[in-house]
Amino acid sequence: MIDAKLVAQLREMTGAGMMDAKKALEEANGDLTVAAEKLQEKGLAKADKKAERETKEGKVHAYLHGNGKLGAMVEILCETDFVARNEAFGALCHDVAMHVGAADPLYVRREDVPQDLVEKQKELFRAEVAEQAKPAEIVEKIVEGKLAKWFGEVCLMEQTFIKDEDLTVGEYVKGKISTIGENIQGARFARFMIS
């Protein structure tokens, strides 16, 4: 029999529903850490399924840094107006806007980067690696690795999240999809700074 306090503790840690938390604890023989991992795996799987659903609602959120000289606006989309008004969704919007203000991304995701710019970056990376006299297939692997790192610098969803360096912004959003229960997409952003 699983203790109700343990179920409550797991729910507080993960945001999972009561029955999901109880089932996860039963499967983990009462081990809180294992149960949390099981819930996270199930939540991420659910988030993947939700990724195809249409997002017609959402929120525009503005973040101003304390001195008033840095600000960011983000448009985050979700499936329903109910979620758009939800406190957890508002917190997500705030976190993403704060990240945009701090990290200054150029694009939302890698698909948004113009193809000619991607090709130009590849050529720059190839020129860097050409001096090392490596076989062509090794050069291409190095170029792809450098390109992935570059996407991680310029694309919002691939940047390391400022509040948790173990996650990218995309992974953070995906985690919120699993707890909020709807597809969530970053749509647009703008960053303003007075220097």
Image: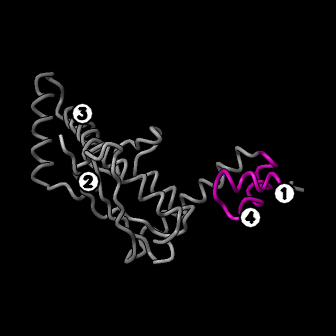
Inspect the image, locate mark 4, and give the three-letter code of the amino acid beneath it.
Met
Give the labeled residue for mark 3: 142
What residue lies at 19% left-to-right and 32% top-to-bottom? 139
Marks 2 and 1, how far apart at CA:
45 Å
Q: Which amino acid does label 2 sit on?
A: Arg
Nearer the observer, 156 or 86: 86
- Residue 84, numbered circle: none
Circle 1 is placed at which residue position? 4
Residue 142 sits inside the magenta stretch: no
Q: Earlier in the sequence, mark 2 or mark 3?
A: 2
> Mark 2, mark 3: which one is toward the viewer?
2
Toward which corner of the image does residue 120 lie, by quadrant? top left
Percent position (x, y) of residue 136? 16, 33
- Please determine whether, in this image, residue 104 is positioned above or below residue 108: above
The residue stretch that appears in magenta: 4-31
Q: Residue 110 carries which label?
A: 2
**Identity of the residue drawn at 11% across and 49% down:** 117
Q: Which residue lies furthest to the front in this view?
A: 67
Tag 4 secondary structure: helix
Q: Nearer the viewer, mark 2 or mark 1?
A: 1
Q: Which amino acid does label 1 sit on?
A: Ala
- For the C terminus, the image quarter is top left
The amino acid type of the residue labelled 3 equals Ile
Q: Residue 18 carries which label?
A: 4
